[in-house]
Image: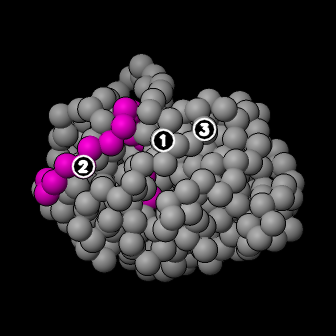
């Protein structure tokens, strides 16, 4: 995991350095909140106009992010900080976690925010609004990506150095199972059918898991260093860091559909416009690529801050 040394943003109250957002503007369309690790800020991308509307300083080289219904949660590993922001950039809550906070997932129905601790093989369970700690869950070594299943039944965590996924009951927080994956799993996601897909950065493939069994259903080859996953129009989309591509896989047959060229070193990926678009953060190209999920055509390359990671569900839909 790379947390590059950069000039850090001031640690004073977060403020906007591009034009201020106002409530009326927020209704215009989907917004993408892209964490820029190298420049320690957050790009607010208007997907309707395909422009960066604002940039919010976020000290601590932010990586993990989740945006949902008027709130944005950002994880900054360098300062071990988790923050809850308004879409306009106001700081609503903040906490410091003693460890290596990395990935983040939201269980909105239960008001739980989950944050993975890279250094201590655990997941913090926080109150999503106050960010007060509620519990800790043990995982294998170096947990990274986190995800809640459709309907909120399961929490999944990719334990990179244990080469496995940990599954928990999201209601009781009780451990359910550990399932072996490929080498060094990092990002993951549940498809609309409830299957868990895991990007294995070390083995260049994706593990598809039935969490009910639990059991591995398939191992699918993709590009070099698969990282993040998203699902739209009956397809899985997988970012391949070293290949500068996105692999597209049919969800029904698990057969490859296409390989798409995107920005350099693609990492975070999410869907927008009700699944009509897929958006991909290119860490080295400093861009957000917008793809038509049906035609697979590139619609836009939108400039961001330096080193966009966008590790999580970073699109806030209208």
- Is residue 60 something that shows in the picture? no
292 w.r.t. 58: above or below = below
Where disc 1 sits, the SS reads: strand
Residue 74 left/right relative to 110 = right
Residue 215 left/right relative to 152 = right
Residue 208 left/right relative to 60 = right
The residue that mark 3 highlights is: 182
Query: Closer to the camera: disc 1 or disc 2?
Result: 1
Other residues around mark 3 within 10 Å, as few (<14) / some (14–19) / many (≥20): many
Residue 280, image x, y percentages: 65, 51
The residue that mark 1 highlights is: 164
Where disc 2 sits, the SS reads: strand
Point out the stretch of residues depicted in magenta.
Answer: 133-147
Q: Is residue 5 magenta?
A: no
Residue 152, image x, y percentages: 39, 73
- Is residue 122 something that shows in the picture? yes
Residue 204 left/right relative to 169 = right
The residue that mark 2 highlights is: 137
Residue 82, image x, y percentages: 26, 47
Tell me where residue 251 sits by quadrant. bottom right
Numbered tag placed on residue 308 in the rendering: none
Q: Which residue corresponds to the image point at 82% horizontal and 45% vertical from the top-left?
A: 261
């Amino acid at each position: 995991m790379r947390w590059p040394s950069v000039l850090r943003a001031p640690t004073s109250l977060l403020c906007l350095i591009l034009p201020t957002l106002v409530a009326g503007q927020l209704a215009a369309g989907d917004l993408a909140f892209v964490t820029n690790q190298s420049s320690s800020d957050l790009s607010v991308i208007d997907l309707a106009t395909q422009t960066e509307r604002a940039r919010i300083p976020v000290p601590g080289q932010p990586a993990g992010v989740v945006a949902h219904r008027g709130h944005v949660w950002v994880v900054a590993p360098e300062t071990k900080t988790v923050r809850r922001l308004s879409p306009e950039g106001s700081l609503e809550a903040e906490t410091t976690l003693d460890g290596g906070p990395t990935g983040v997932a939201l269980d909105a129905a239960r008001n739980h925010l989950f944050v993975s601790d890279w250094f201590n093989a655990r997941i913090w369970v926080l109150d999503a609004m106050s960010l007060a700690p509620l519990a800790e869950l043990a995982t294998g070594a170096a947990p990274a990506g986190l995800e809640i299943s459709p309907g909120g039944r399961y929490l999944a965590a990719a334990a990179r150095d244990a080469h496995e996924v940990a599954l928990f009951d999201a209601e009781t927080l009780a451990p359910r199972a550990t399932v072996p994956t490929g080498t060094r799993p990092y990002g993951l996601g549940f498809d609309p059918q409830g299957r868990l897909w895991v990007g294995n950065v070390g083995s260049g493939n994706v593990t598809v898991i039935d969490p009910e069994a639990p059991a591995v259903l398939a191992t699918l080859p993709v590009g070099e260093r698969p990282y993040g996953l998203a699902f739209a129009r009956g397809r899985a989309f997988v970012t391949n860091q070293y290949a500068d591509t996105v692999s597209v896989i049919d969800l029904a047959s698990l057969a490859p559909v296409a390989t798409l060229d995107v920005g350099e070193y693609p990492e975070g990926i999410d869907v927008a416009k009700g699944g009509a678009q897929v958006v991909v953060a290119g860490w080295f190209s400093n861009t957000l690529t917008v793809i038509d999920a049906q035609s697979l055509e590139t619609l836009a390359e939108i400039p961001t801050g330096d080193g966009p990671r966008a590790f999580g569900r970073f699109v806030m839909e209208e």
